[in-house]
Image (cartoon, rainbow, N blue to C red):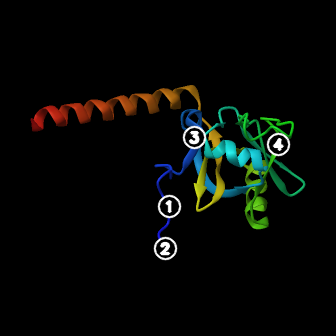
Amino acid sequence: MSKKKANAPTSNTIALNKKAKHEYHIEERFEAGLALLGWEVKSLRAGKAQLVDAYVLLKDGEAWLLGSHITPLNTASTHVIADPTRTRKLLLHAKEIAKIVGQVNQAGYTCIPLALYWKKNRVKCEIALVKGKKLFDKRATEKERDWNRQKQRIMREANT
């Protein structure tokens, strides 16, 4: 019995929040499950998700993903009224939620989603405790990135 892997995706990543690394200092990461509807899972398999302006809301001992956009497929959501930006529940352990709530309330942290990805047959959301970067931090990061690129270019030219 062989398993069929002909149409398997090359990457497990569904969506990335690229803006997060530019806007925030990432302090600590958590892996959370995501409570989804059937049409959302089909849309995620097609890669129709965005995390651009998404954030995590902590309320009543639960974590919720707000602002994420999952575009409904025409073929998958024919019998239901699909809300692409609905609030989705994040599935975390109580200790993790308590730790996140403590940091957010006390130390001025924010909680944002970094990525959506597949783990086996489940959708996981990587969330992180972050602190906002100041303008000079963003410039320093950009300067360092440019310098690293320049170093790579110089090394490549020296080796040839």
Residue 87: numbered disc? 4
| Residue 72 in which image quadrant | top right
Marks 3/4: CA–CA distance: 18 Å
* Residue 89 drawn at (x, y percent): 80, 51
- The residue carrying mark 3 is 16
Marks 1/2: CA–CA distance: 10 Å
Where disc 3 sits, the SS reads strand
The answer to which of marks 2 and 3 sits earlier in the sequence is 2
* Residue in the foreground of this view, choosing between 102 and 126: 126
* Residue 57 drawn at (x, y percent): 80, 45
Residue 1: numbered disc? 2
| Residue 73 in which image quadrant | top right
Amino acid type, mark 1: Lys
Q: Residues within 10 Å of mark 3 (few under 14, many from 20)?
A: some
Marks 1/4: CA–CA distance: 34 Å
Which residue is at a point 54% across and 47% down the rendered structure image? 13
Q: Residues within 10 Å of mark 4 (few under 14, many from 20)?
A: some
Which residue is at a point 46% across and 49% down the rendered structure image? 10
* Residue 133 drawn at (x, y percent): 59, 34
Amino acid type, mark 2: Met
Amino acid type, mark 4: Thr
Give the mark toward the camera: 3 or 1: 1
Q: Is residue 22 above or below residue 33?
A: above
